[in-house]
Amino acid sequence: MKIEDVVCPFCGCLCDDLVVEVEGTRVVNVENGCTLANEKFMGDHRLKAPIRRAGNGWEAVSYDEAIEETAAILLDADRPLLYGWSGTYGEAQSVGVHLAELLGAVIDNTSTVCHGPSIMAIQEVGHPGCTLGQVKNRADVVVYWAANPIEAHPRHMSRYTTFCDGFFVKSAFRERKVVVVDVRETDSSQVADEFVKVNPGGDYAVLSALRAIVRGKRDLIPPSVEGVSREQLFRVADLCMSAKFGAIFFGVGLTMAQGKNKNIRNAIELTEELNRHTKFTISPMRGHWNVYGSNEVFTWITGYPYAVDFARGIAFYNPGETTSVDILRRGECDACLVVASDPGAHFPRACAEHLARIPTVQIDPHVNATTHLSRIQIPVAVTGIDAEGTAYRMDGVPIRTRRLFYGNYPDDLEVLEKIYRIVREARG
Amino acid sequence: MAGILIKNAFVIDPLSGIKGEVMDIAIKNGKIVEEEPPGAEVIDAGGCLTLPGGIDSHSHVCGTKVNFGRYMSPEDMRAGRTARKGVMHVTSGYSVPTTFGNSYRYSTMGYTTILEGAMAPLEARHTHEEFNATPHQDMLANTLFDGNWSIMEAVREKDIARAAAVVAWVLAAAKGFAIKLTNPGGTEAWGWGEDVQSIHDPVPRFGVTPAEIISTMIRANEILNLPHSVHLHCNNLGVPGNYQTTLDTIDLAPDLNSKRQSLYLTHVQFHSYGGSTWRDICSKSEDITRAVNNRPQVVMDMGQIMFGRTTTMTADGPMEFKLYMLHHNKWSNHDVELETGSGIIPVYYGRKSLVNCVMWSIGLELALLTRNPWQCLLSTDSPNGAPFVKYPEIIALLMSRRFRENERRMIDPRTEHFVPLFAIERELDWYEIAVMTRAAQAKALGITCIGKGYMAPGAEADVAIFPIMPDKVDPSVDFQQVMAGFSRTRYTIKRGRVVARDGEVVVEGANSTIWTKAHVPDAYDMSLDPEFQKKFEQYYTVRMSNYPVQDVYLPRGVRIDTEAQL
C-alpha cells in the first residue's frame, strides 16, 4: 500500500510530502525522503518488548509490570527529572507535563542542550521570524549561520530556500543569493554565493561588525574581524541591506559556541536593525522533528518552554539551575524518566554517570546509548510510523503526523497515561 | 444529573426582555428549563445579580502568537503564578496567562464563552490544541483572511462568489468561526516591510485596496450566511489621526442583515485618534460614536486600555514594529505565508504618559457616547489594552462618574484638554452592563441560535451569580463593591454544572469548540479548483491534504451549518 503526503518524523523540517509504501507492519519503500528519512522509516532497530536490568543482564517484563515499576520509582523519588520529549507528539508531551506537575518533578526537553540559548536570547530581545513559506516565496538573500543544512536538514534548501522556486522568486537558484557563515568548509558552504569563514568562537565579533556597518559606522571596522576581511563584511552587509527579503537561519554552531545566548541575541539584534532598511527574518534550525512542539506544549501549560521545576508547587524556570545537565551534574536528581530522546549519547559524561547511578527509565522504541544507563526500558510505537499526533515544525507550523499501520506496540500516550493514572491514584 | 434550581435570583437577561426581577431559574441536562426538575440541587441566590454567562467577543487567549507571548516573557509568567490546588492545575502569567490560567480566571469572573480574536488558518491546529486546554469556556476562533492571496485575487477579479467559496473552504479546513480582517492588505505589504496608509492605498504586487477587500468580504460573508459578520481590525491602528481611516471604513458598511450588524469593528479605541503626531494626539470618540450611532449596521468593541503592564499581540505585524520603534523593549514578529502576519511586544501604559491617558479616556468615551449599548461591547482586546482581569474595573468606571473623577486626579493633568471624557455625565446601569458583557456579544456573534447569551427555557445553562445586591448597591457611589463583585462570582454555572464558586474552580471542565461550515454547491468547492490547488502545490509549504484541522482536534465540536446563496 502506498501512502501519500506522509510527514517525516526526523528533523525540524517536518517534510510532509513523502510517499511511503507499506507491507503489513513494515515500510518497504520511501519516495521524496532524504537519507535520514529513509533510515528512519526503513531502519529496524526496535526493542521488541520491555526489559529490566537483572544483575549484569536484562530480563523481559510485561508492559504492566514495567509501567507499575516506573510509577513506583517516580513516586519514591524526591527530585525526579522527566527528560526528553522531542521525539514524541504533543498529546504525549502534554501528559508528561501534567505528570511532572503531579510529582513536583523537573521536566525538561532537548532544547536544554541545543537551542536553549536561543530561547534565552529570545526572552531578552524577541524574535522577528516567519513561516518557511515566506522565505520560499520572497527571499532573495538567505544566510545560513553556523548551520550545515545539507547534512543536518537535507531538504531545507530544496524545500524552502536555495533550490526552491517561489511566487515572487521564479528562479530561486539564479535570483536568490546564499551566504554561509561557518568555522569550516562544509557541503553547504560549497553551494554558497558567499562563504564567510569565521575563526572558532568569533561569531559574536563578526555579528557586531555587521551591526556596526548596518548602523552606518563603516569606519570603525578594522581590516579583519575574527578572520573575516573588512571587504567581505562590507559585501555581506550590502547584500543584506539591498535585499528585498532576507532570511537568516542559524544552527547549533552558534548556540553552543563561545558566547552562546549572547551570540543569538546579537544575531537577532542584527536582524532587527536590518528591518529598519528592508525586510529580514531570523529562524533557528531546530533539530528534532518535534522539539519545537515540546517548547510549545510546555509553554501553554506551564508558561515556560523548557527546564520547568514544579518542586515548589508552582512552575519555576531558571536555566542554569533547573536545566537537566545542571541538575544531573549536581547529583541532585534521584530518578529519571527519559522519553523519546537519548541523553546517554548527548549529555556530558558526569551527567550520564549520574543517570546510571539512579533509577533511570527510558520510554523509547529503539535501543540506544541511554538503554545502557537505564534500569527499565519500555518500547513504544514510533510516532509518524505506527503512532500519530501533533508536531510543530521548526517555524511553528503544526502538522499532524500520520500512522501508516497499526503495529504491536503501545504508543507514548498510552504508556504515559497509565503511569499518570497510577501516580494520580497515589498522590490524589 | 438531577439539575439545579436557582432561587431568588435578581435576573437581568436582556435577550429575554428581563430587566431586573427576582425569580427562580431551573436547569436540567445542561439547559434552562421551565419546570423545577425533581430532586434538583437548590442554590439560593439571595437576591444577588444573576446574568447569563459572560461572553468575550474579542480576546487573545490561544494559538501561535499568544503562546509566543508566553514563550518570550518569563517575566510575565512569574508575575502571576498559582500552585496546583484541588482540580486546578498550576498557572503562570499575568498579561498572557497559561491556558488553564486564562480559563480559571475567566471562569471565576463568570465568563463561559470566549472568541479568540485571530487565528492564522495555517496554524489553526495550534489554536485548537490550546482550546482543548482551556476547559471552562466554549471557544470560537476568528479566522484571518486579511492577506490571503486567494482572497485578494478574487477581489482583483471582482469575483465575490469566489471569495465566498475560498472563505467556506478555509473556515471548514481551519475549523474557524468567522472572518477576521486585521489591517487588510497591510499584513501582505508587511511581507516586504511595507504597510498601507489608507483604505484606498493599493497592496503592493496585488493591486487591490483595503476598501475593496473589506467590501468584498462583507458581501461574501452574507452570501455564506455566516452567523457573525466580518470582524475588522481597521487599517492604521495606533496612528495619530487614524480616526479618518476608521470613519472611511464605517462608510463602507452596507446594511445587509436584519438580525445583526454587517460589520464588527474591534478595539475601536486604538482607531479613534485625532492629531497628527504623538504630541497633539487627541480623542475623536465623538466623531466615531456619531457615525456608529447613525448606523445600526455597525457594532464595535471598546478596546479599553488600563494603566499598568501588559503585552500587545496582533496579526498586525507592521503596527507592532512601529510600536517597537517607540518602546525599544523587545519585539517578535511572525509572518504567515499566503495568509497574514503577527507581532508581539510588551508595553507599559502609564498614568504619567499623556498619550496613554488620552487612550484610556477614549475607550471609556466610546462606551459612554454610544447611545445603544448593543453597539458598543466591553473589551480590552485582551491583553492588548489590558488583561481581561481588568474588566470589573472598567465596569465600575462606566457605572460611576465619581470613580472617573477620582481617576482624573491621578492622571496627567493635561489630559482633559485633549478628551471630552470629564464632561460626560452618563453612568451606565446594570442592564446596560449586562448587554455590553454578554447579550450584545451573543447577538453580534450570531450564537443565540445555539442557546448562548440568554436564560430563557431552551438556552444553554451558562449562568453567573455575582455577590452584588443591585437594590442595595448604588454603583455610582459604591464602585469598589461593583469592582469586587464582578471580579469573583458566587457561582459560575457552565452547561448546567457549577464550575466555579467564590473564586475557585471546582470541577474539571469540558468545553466545546464552535465552528462554522458553510455549504456551497460543488462548482464552488475550492478543493476541486485547479488554481486553488496550485497554491498548495507551489507556494504553501504544507500539502493540501495535511492542511485541514482533523476532527480529532475538536472532541466536542459544535458545528453551525449554513447554506450559501451561490
Image: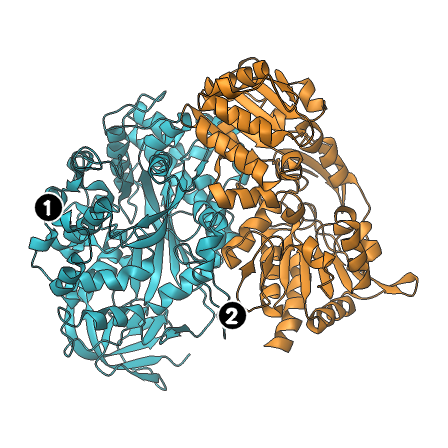
Chain colours: A orange, B cyan
Q: Residue at position x 70%, y 53% from top?
A: A325
**Rendered view: A371 above or below B88:** above
Q: Nearest the camera: B3 or A377?
A: A377
Q: Is any part of residue B477 visible from this angle?
A: yes
- The residue beneath circle 1 is B417
Q: Residue farthest to the bottom?
A: B39
Q: Nearest the camera: A91 or B396?
A: B396
Locate residue B404 relative to residue A156 in the image: left or right. left
Q: Nearest the camera: B121 or B72?
A: B72
Label ID, residue B84: 2
Residue B54: x and y in percent read 29, 63
Q: Is any part of residue A168 visible from this angle?
A: no
Q: Which quadrant of the rendered structure holds the N terminus of chain A?
A: top right
Locate residue B143 relative to residue A73 in the image: left or right. left
Query: For the residue labelled by badge 1, is the local secondary structure a helix, a strand or a loop?
Result: helix
Residue B462: x and y in percent read 32, 68
Label ID, residue A299: none
Q: Chain of mark 2?
A: B
Q: Residue at position x 55%, y 53% from top?
A: A297
Q: Chain of mark 1?
A: B
Residue A98: x and y in percent read 58, 64
Residue type at numbered disc 2: Arg
Distance from the alpha carbon under mark 1 to that under mark 2: 49 Å
Question: Mark 1 Cα within 10 Å, few/some/many (few <14, many 20+)?
Answer: few
Query: For the residue labelled by badge 2, is the local secondary structure a helix, a strand or a loop?
Result: loop
**Rendered view: A21 above or below A419:** above
Locate residue B566 relative to residue A336 in the image: left or right. left
Query: Are discs 1 and 2 less than 8 Å apart at CB?
Result: no
**Between discs 1 and 2, the one toward the N terminus:** 2
Q: Nearest the camera: A211 or A224?
A: A224
Residue type at numbered disc 1: His
